[in-house]
Every structure is written in C-alpha cells, then in structure tokens.
Image (cartoon, grey):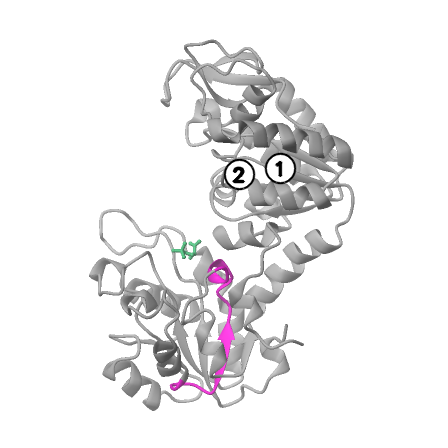
Amino acid sequence: KKTVKDIDVAGKKVLLRCDFNVPMAKDGSGVITDDKRIRAALPTIQYLLDQNAAVIACSHMGKPKGEVVPSLSLKPVAARLSELLGKDVIMAEDVVGPDAQAKAAALKPGQIMLLENTRFEKGETKNDPELARAMASMAEVYVSDAFGAVHRAHASTAGVADYLPAVSGFLIQKELEIIGGALANPKRPLVAILGGSKVSSKIGVINNLLEIADTIIIGGGMTYTFLKAQGGSIGKSLLEEDWLDYCNDMMKKAQEKGVKLLLPEDTVCAKEFSADAEPMTVDSMHIPDDCLGMDIGPKAIASYSEAVKDAGTVIWNGPMGVFEFPAFAAGTKAVAEALSKSSAITIIGGGDSAAAVQQLGYADRMTHISTGGGASLEFMEGKELPGVACLLDA
Ligand code: 3PG
C-alpha cells in the first residue's frame, strides 16, 4: 500500500484518521489511563506537520450511537495530544458541522486540529457516503493511521477513500509489515500462543494459523472446552458446549498437518472465581467437580517456555489465565517472561494480551505490541481489512 511518503502532502490539507479510542478513568474525570494509541500516532503527525501540512485529525471513541455523548468527547485527547506535541491542537465542536467546517477552512499549514468523535454522526458506522463526502470535502489528501479500526468499514475509516487520494501512515505501515510479515513469511519455527476465554472468538485465528504455524499453544479459558472434548473432567470450568466437536476437529487437523497443538498438562484451579480463592494445582484431565480452571500449571509453564525458547517467531494473543488476580497470574507472567528471553520475533496481539504484557512489565522487551485488538485478530484470521483495502496500491 502507498504510504504518506509516496504522496505529496507539503502544504496540503490532510484528513488523518487515527485510533484515539483510548481507555478513560471510569469516574468521568476525563483522565486518559493509557495514552499508548496517542503516542503511536505521533510519528505520522510529526511528519505531516514537518511537511507543513494542515492536519485535520479524526477518530471515534467508545460506541455512541450517532448522537452526542459528552463523556465520549475527544476533548481530553486533544489536550493530551497537545502536551505530547508541545503544540496547540484546535478542537472542533462537531464532526462535519459548522464549527468543524470553519476551523478546517481557516487551518494554516503546520497547524493541527481534531474533529469531534466521528461516531457522534449517525452516518459513521453505516459508512454513509454523504458523511464520507462531507469529511473529505475539508481536505485534499486522506491518511489513515488508525490500525485499531481498520477492520471497520465506516465512513471515516474506509468511505472517505472514495473521495480523496488515500494512503497509510507509519503506524499502519509498521503493523502491516510486522504482523503481515510474520504471517506471510515467518522466521521459523512459528509458534502461536492463543489464550483468552472463548474458543468461539478464536476460531478464525486457529483455523488460519493451522495453515501457517509450526506449533499452536492453547491456554486461558478456552482450554477447558478442548480438554472436555478430549475426554477430560473439567469441573465448573468455562465450557462452550457447542464447540466441542470443533475442538476435536482442530486437534485432528493439526495432527494431519503436522502442527504441534499443545494443551496444558496441569491446571491451577479454585473453588470460586475470586482473587482470594485458594489455588490448587491438578492434572488438567482431572479437575475436581467443585473447582474451575483459573490458570495453566507449572508443568505447562515449563513445556510452553521450552516451545518458545528456540522459536523464530512467536505470535501471542490472549492471556493464559485470570492474570488480573495475582494468585492466578503465574502462567501469563511466565509466558511473557519466556518471550522476553527468547531471541524470536515476538508479536503481541492487542487487547488483553497487550494489557497483560504492559501490566506485568515486559512491554519493552517485545518486538511489537499491536495497537489493534479486534483489528489484529481479524488480520491474523487472514481477513481483508476494509480500512487497508481502501488505500492506494503501491
Ligand atoms: C478498538 O478499541 O479495538 C478499536 O478502537 C475499535 O473499536 P470498536 O470495536 O468500537 O469499533
């Protein structure tokens, strides 16, 4: 795909789609609790400003349904962005209304403004061409750097590309290069570590990775559906009944393809789902009737760490256990540690696994932590991403 370097942006008005959907404090104070996504957009913003472009930035935040929700205003993002850039960020009161139009028209080269939450407009999630056209009419070039939102075919992530020359920023370029490279042409062996609570949300990824990976490691809540499918007793553990057959098919398919599919030999379980529940290590196939699985056990930690040690590439998506509770964080922590020591290219899918790596203090030691949650998942499923497909081919 063409990037911002393949097009002339000097002195031009540029509509820049970012993913500024950042976590905010729950008390409504407008405090941003993690500004990683804002920082991740800085290289492209700085480049555009250095080129003397007039930057009209935009993003969604949360899920307002086409109406103004004051607690989902992007004003706190403008303030944080302004601090990070050391520069005024002009905040528009609307998306394509009179205030945005006037401020965009008056915007000078080297200045930056931010439109209000694109989802305050009904047309955004419907990819309404009228909204896309109105957004595009404020600018001469469209740059998308919103990797976290490229799986959405919305007016600001895809529709605008019908009306403006559209290229990617440096963040999307980096995400596509690193994740795309690992999927298309991995340094082998390629080890995929898949966790998280549900088999159903990881099916597409497992299916796609069965075609590509050398080893697939399973952890987290979805383990128990696999164990049950294999004839294990899983007590009160999370179970997706409807996916039992699927799990068996996956195990068979892995065998046919020569892909190693690893399940945890042992499990740390507890009598209740709570932070101060008593942890107990048991054989994974024999979880007591009154217990539920909460984490992978020490034997699983040893074999998973071993599998990672000589990997060429490791892709990790989803925690190994309930890492929010310290007594059940050992599995997730050990995997993070193993990755940090491995010489492999280490790629962390966004969402929970990114949060775990950050929370446990291993973020600096990974090759790449994706800024996309759903987007990185769909990318790993091998799906076409509308926010990438709409960009000009290189
Ligand atoms: C994300 O946080 O994954 C992206 O910003 C997309 O948000 P959405 O799921 O509300 O479209």
Q: Is residue 75 magenta?
A: no
Kindly identify the amino acid type of the residue bearing the numbered disc 2: Gly
Q: Are marks 1 and 2 in contact (CB under 8 Å)?
A: yes
Identify the residue at image location x=51%, y=62%: 147
Identify the residue at image location x=59%, y=16%: 231
Q: Quadrant of the N terminus?
A: bottom right
- Image-based side of 153 in relation to 383, left or right: left
Residue tagged 1 = 193
Kindly identify the amino acid type of the residue bearing the numbered disc 1: Ile
| Residue 159 makes an appearance in the image | yes
**Alpha carbon distance from label 1 to label 2:** 8 Å
- Image-based side of 350 in relation to 133, left or right: right
Identify the residue at image location x=47%, y=46%: 351
Q: Nearer the viewer, residue 209 or 248?
A: 248
Determine which quarter of the picture holds residue 236: top left
| Residue 240 makes an appearance in the image | no
> Would you place residue 185 above or below residue 192 in this image?
below
Give the secondary structure at mark 2. Answer: loop
- Image-based side of 202 in relation to 191, left or right: left
The location of residue 13, given as percent across then percent down, is 44, 86
Q: How many marks?
A: 2
> Would you place residue 261 above or below residue 315 in this image?
above
Identify the residue at image location x=26%, y=75%: 94
The location of residue 43, given as percent across then percent down, is 54, 69
> Would you place residue 5 above or below residue 327 in this image?
below
Determine which quarter of the picture holds residue 320: top right
Q: Nearer the viewer, residue 18 or 366?
A: 18
Dot 1 alpha-carbon crowd within 10 angstroms: few under 14, some 14 to 19, many 20 or more = many
